[in-house]
C-alpha cells in the first residue's frame, strides 16, 4: 500500500500533523464502499419487526441515529440492499451543500435497517484504521469543509459526492494504538459536552413551559391579577374575568382552508422557488419557513394556498403533543 510520509505532513484541510503520523488517501484504507436503493416507504419509523430504510438525517456530526428511518412497504422488501452493520461508517453522498459528506459511526448490527441510494456504507482496513477514530476525523471541520468543496451538482440546494473524490480525501493516521487512545479521549470529552448541551436544552424547555404558562394566564385572566373571576364552564379553560364573554371560535372565523400535499423534493426550496410547508413549520409556537419541501419544476403551484398576511396556521395532524400547534407567520411578509 503506497503512502506519503513527511517529517511534518502538511494537509490542506487539516494543517500540520505530528511528524510520526502517516498521510493516506481515504481509499487506501477503505475495504468497501456500498450503497442501498431507493424504495417506497411510509414516513413513520419502522417498528422492531419491520424493515426500515434510513433517512439522510440518520448521520450527523459523527453520530448515527437509527431512529431516523422510514417503514418500507411490504411489497418493496425484496428490493432492499445494504443492511446496517457494526463497525462501519455511514456517509451522506447526496445532500445540501452544508450536509453533504456528513457521516456517523455504527457500533452494532441493525439487521432490519437498510441504506437508501443517498447513503454510503464504508468499511475500513482494521489493521490500519480504528473506525471510531476515522469517524472523528471525517466529522472534523477540516474534513467537512473538504468534502463539501468536493461535491458537485447544478442545483444550489443539492450536491453530490463521487466515490473517486471522496476516496482521494487525505487523512492523517497515527499508529493504531494511538488512534484508539485519541478516539477514547474524544468520546469522553464529547460526551461531557453533550451532557452540558442536554442540561442547557432542559433549561430551555423549562423556560418554554414558563413562557406558555405566562401566555395562558394572561389570555385567560387578563393583566389585572385582582380582577373578579367566574367559571368559564370549560374544564380546560378554568375561570375567566367576570366581565369577559365566552364565544365559540367559529363565530369569529372568516374562512378555514386545508392545504395541499403534492409529491415534493426532499430538500427545502430556495428563496425564488415554490415550497410546501412541513408540519414542523408550526411547532413551538414559532413559524419556521425553512421547514418546507421544494415543489418540483414540473408541478404547477396552486397560488390559492399561498400564505398571506393575517393568516393563522394550525397543525391539524401531528403527534399528541404538537397537535393543534398555532403560529402567526407575520415575519414572512416583512
Image (spheres, rainbow, N blue to C red):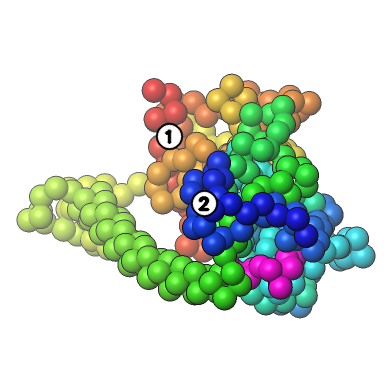
For the residue pair 112 and 9, the one nearer the viewer reads as 9
Residue at the extreme left of the image, as rendered: 226
Quarter of the C terminus within the rendering: top left
Q: Which residues are magenta?
A: 120-133
- The residue located at (91%, 60%) in the rendering is 79
Count neighbours of disc 1 (C-alpha within 10 A) and say few if under 14, some if 14 to 19, many if 20 or more: many
Q: From the image, tell me which residue sits under label 2.
A: 8
Q: Secondary structure at mark 2?
A: loop
Q: Is residue 131 magenta?
A: yes
For the residue pair 97 and 49, the one nearer the viewer reads as 97
Q: Quadrant of residue 122?
A: bottom right
Q: Is residue 147 visible?
A: yes
The disc at residue 317 is none
- The residue located at (52%, 29%) in the rendering is 307
Q: Is residue 213 visible?
A: no
Q: From the image, tell me which residue sits under label 1.
A: 329
Q: Secondary structure at mark 1?
A: loop
Distance from label 2 to label 1 (Cα)? Answer: 55 Å
Count neighbours of disc 2 (C-alpha within 10 A) and say few if under 14, some if 14 to 19, many if 20 or more: some
Quarter of the N terminus within the rendering: bottom right
For the residue pair 141 and 320, the one nearer the viewer reads as 141
For the residue pair 16 and 334, the one nearer the viewer reads as 16
Say whether residue 213 is left or right of residue 313.
Answer: left
Say whether residue 91 is left or right of residue 174.
Answer: right
Q: Is residue 265 above or below residue 135?
A: above
Q: Nearer the viewer, mark 2 or mark 1?
A: 2
The disc, 2 or 1, on the residue closer to the chain's N-terminal end is 2
- The residue located at (84%, 54%) in the rendering is 37
Amino acid at each position: 500500500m503506497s503512502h506519503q510520509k513527511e517529517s511534518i505532513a502538511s494537509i490542506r484541510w487539516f494543517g500540520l500533523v505530528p511528524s510520526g503520523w502517516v498521510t493516506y488517501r481515504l481509499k487506501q484504507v477503505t475495504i468497501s464502499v456500498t450503497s442501498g436503493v431507493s424504495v417506497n416507504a411510509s414516513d413513520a419509523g419502522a417498528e422492531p419487526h419491520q424493515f426500515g430504510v434510513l433517512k439522510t438525517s440518520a448521520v450527523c456530526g459523527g453520530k448515527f441515529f437509527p431512529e431516523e428511518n422510514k417503514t418500507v412497504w411490504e411489497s418493496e422488501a425484496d428490493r432492499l440492499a445494504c443492511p446496517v452493520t457494526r463497525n462501519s461508517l455511514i456517509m451522506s453522498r447526496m445532500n445540501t451543500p452544508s450536509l453533504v459528506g456528513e457521516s456517523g459511526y455504527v457500533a452494532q448490527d441493525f439487521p432490519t435497517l437498510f441504506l437508501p441510494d443517498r447513503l454510503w456504507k464504508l468499511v475500513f482496513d482494521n489493521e490500519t484504521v480504528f473506525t471510531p477514530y476515522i469517524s472523528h476525523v471525517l466529522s472534523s471541520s477540516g474534513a467537512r469543509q473538504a468534502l463539501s468543496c468536493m461535491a458537485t451538482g447544478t442545483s444550489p440546494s443539492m450536491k453530490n459526492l463521487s466515490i473517486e473524490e471522496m476516496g482521494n480525501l487525505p487523512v492523517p493516521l497515527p499508529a493504531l494504538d494511538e488512534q484508539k487512545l485519541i478516539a477514547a479521549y474524544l468520546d469522553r470529552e464529547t460526551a461531557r459536552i453533550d451532557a452540558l448541551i442536554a442540561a442547557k436544552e432542559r433549561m430551555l424547555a423549562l423556560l418554554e413551559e414558563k413562557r406558555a404558562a405566562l401566555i395562558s394566564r394572561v389570555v385567560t385572566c387578563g393583566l389585572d391579577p385582582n380582577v373578579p373571576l367566574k367559571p368559564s364552564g370549560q374544564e380546560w379553560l378554568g375561570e375567566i374575568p367576570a366581565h369577559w364573554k365566552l364565544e365559540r371560535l367559529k363565530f369569529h372565523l372568516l374562512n378555514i382552508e386545508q392545504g395541499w400535499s403534492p409529491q415534493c423534493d426532499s430538500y427545502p426550496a430556495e428563496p425564488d422557488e415554490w415550497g410546501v410547508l412541513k408540519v414542523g413549520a408550526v411547532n413551538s409556537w414559532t413559524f419556521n419557513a425553512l421547514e418546507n419541501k421544494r415543489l418540483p419544476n414540473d408541478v404547477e403551484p396552486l397560488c390559492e394556498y399561498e400564505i398571506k398576511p393575517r393568516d393563522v396556521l394550525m397543525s391539524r395532524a401531528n403527534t399528541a403533543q404538537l397537535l393543534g400547534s398555532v403560529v402567526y407567520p407575520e415575519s414572512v411578509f416583512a
